[in-house]
């Protein structure tokens, strides 16, 4: 692994102090930050920023976790579109699953692991991505 892309659900667990998942997310971020670089992309940044009033608050929260923000490479954007087409051909019904595809494609192209609780789409459309999830620990 070249690093780990952190999905928004993991950060939202911490930022909202989710009763069920905050402990797992905090422990997993701490564990993997010791031996890997942690990243998010603009999609994750957008999703987690909704709960903040000021950009400085978001920036401080992300910096405090030692997470770097990366722009998405064009290869990942292209792969996102292809995965979405496959999803629709497989009779996928969710109208806006694109954030999951952007995140999975970015992890795939960058050869990152992906820390997430949303496994189904990643396993199906990005099977090459190493997943870090609650059911493995």
Image: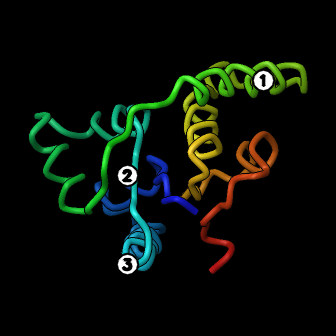
Depth check: 109 or 118 in front?
109
Answer whether labels 2 and 1 touch (C-beta < 8 Å).
Answer: no
Q: Secondary structure at mark 1?
A: loop
Q: Which residue is mark 1?
A: 93
Q: Quadrant of the N terminus?
A: bottom right
Where, by quadrant of the figure, is residue 17 drawn? bottom left
Of marks 2 and 3, which one's residue comes earlier in the chain?
A: 2
Q: Which residue is mark 2?
A: 12
- Label 3 to label 1, Cα distance in Å? 39 Å
Left or right of 72? Residue 49 is left
Q: Which residue is mark 3?
A: 34
- Label 2 to label 3, Cα distance in Å? 21 Å
Depth check: 35 or 81 in front?
35
Q: What residue appears at the point 13 percent right and 51 percent down from the top-left corner?
A: 60
Of marks 2 and 1, which one's residue comes earlier in the chain?
A: 2
- Label 2 to label 1, Cα distance in Å? 25 Å
From the top left corner, tell me how far across and down residue 63 is, in percent: 19, 55
From the top left corner, tell me how far across and down residue 105 is, in percent: 63, 37
């Amino acid at each position: 692994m070249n690093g780990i892309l952190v999905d928004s659900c993991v950060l939202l667990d911490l930022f909202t102090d989710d009763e069920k998942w905050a402990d797992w997310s905090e422990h997993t971020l701490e564990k993997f930050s010791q031996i890997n670089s942690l990243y998010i992309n603009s999609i994750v940044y957008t999703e987690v920023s909704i709960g903040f009033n000021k950009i400085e608050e978001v920036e401080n929260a992300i910096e405090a976790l030692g997470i770097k923000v990366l722009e998405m490479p064009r290869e990942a954007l292209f792969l996102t579109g292809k995965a979405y087409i496959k999803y629709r051909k497989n009779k996928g019904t969710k109208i806006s699953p694109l954030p999951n595809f952007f995140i999975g494609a970015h992890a795939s192209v960058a050869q990152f692991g992906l820390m997430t609780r949303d496994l189904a789409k990643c396993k199906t459309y990005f099977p090459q991505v190493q997943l870090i999830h609650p059911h493995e620990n």
